[in-house]
Image (cartoon, grey):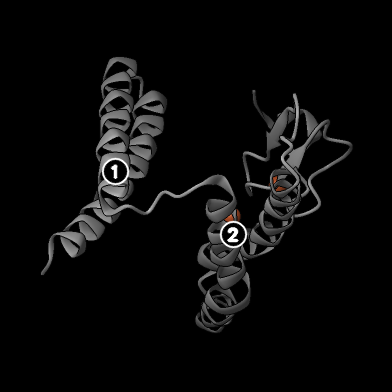
Amino acid sequence: MSTIDDLKEAFAGESQANRRYLAYAEKAETEGFPGVAKLLRAVAAAETVHALNHLKAIGAVGGTVANLTEAMAGEKYEFTEMYPPMLAGAEAEGHKKGARSMRFALEVEKVHYDLFGKALEAVAAGKDLGDVTVHVCPVCGHTVIGPVEGPCPVCGCRPDLYDDIA
Ligand SMILES: [Fe+2]
Ligand SMILES: [Fe+2]
């Protein structure tokens, strides 16, 4: 294994640890351990530092035009090639939670692809998106630039429950 391969593997591991610890923190909160939840969130943040260091050492972070192009390719791969057979498999298997989770992701990746497309268009023209607020559905991840006009089109979640990303 080359160092680049090692860094890629470590990036995947650290990224997963970050999300896993955030899920553990949520659980610790609901079980009445806010101090443990805080520690889990802190270590999750540290794993993000490791993950980003690895990614930068790989040289996988380019300019914003290149990054958005790469991000669009990834989103497109997910909703065209990755999720459709996975979703079909989960449905065939009768894995309801898995199918629901995959359906949410599949639908929302299309939205991400479009939003990144708008961002890429702006950046390619030398502009930013401006002083926008972005909202994320806490149930399915549906993402909206600007005000949320109605229930989530993917999962039906109430508009006031969307999280604000300042
Ligand atoms: Fe996405
Ligand atoms: Fe949603």
Task: Tell me which residue sits at (32%, 19%) in the image.
Answer: 38
Which of label 1 and label 2 is nearer to you?
Answer: 2
As rendered, which of 71 and 121 lies closer to the eye? 121
Q: Is residue 26 above or below residue 32?
A: below
Task: Tell me which residue sits at (81%, 32%) in the image.
Answer: 146
Q: Is residue 119 left or right of residue 5?
A: right
Q: How far is disc 1 from disc 2 in space, using C-alphas?
A: 21 Å
Crowdedness near tag 1: few (<14), some (14–19) or many (≥20) residues, C-alpha within 10 Å:
many
The x, y position of residue 22, in whole percent, is 37, 35
The residue beneath circle 1 is 51
Q: Quadrant of ligand 1?
A: bottom right
- Residue type at mark 2: give it: Thr
Task: Tell me which residue sits at (63%, 44%) in the image.
Answer: 139
Q: Is residue 121 left or right of residue 22?
A: right
The x, y position of residue 125, in whole percent, is 76, 46
The residue beneath circle 2 is 69
Q: Is residue 1 above or below residue 92?
A: above
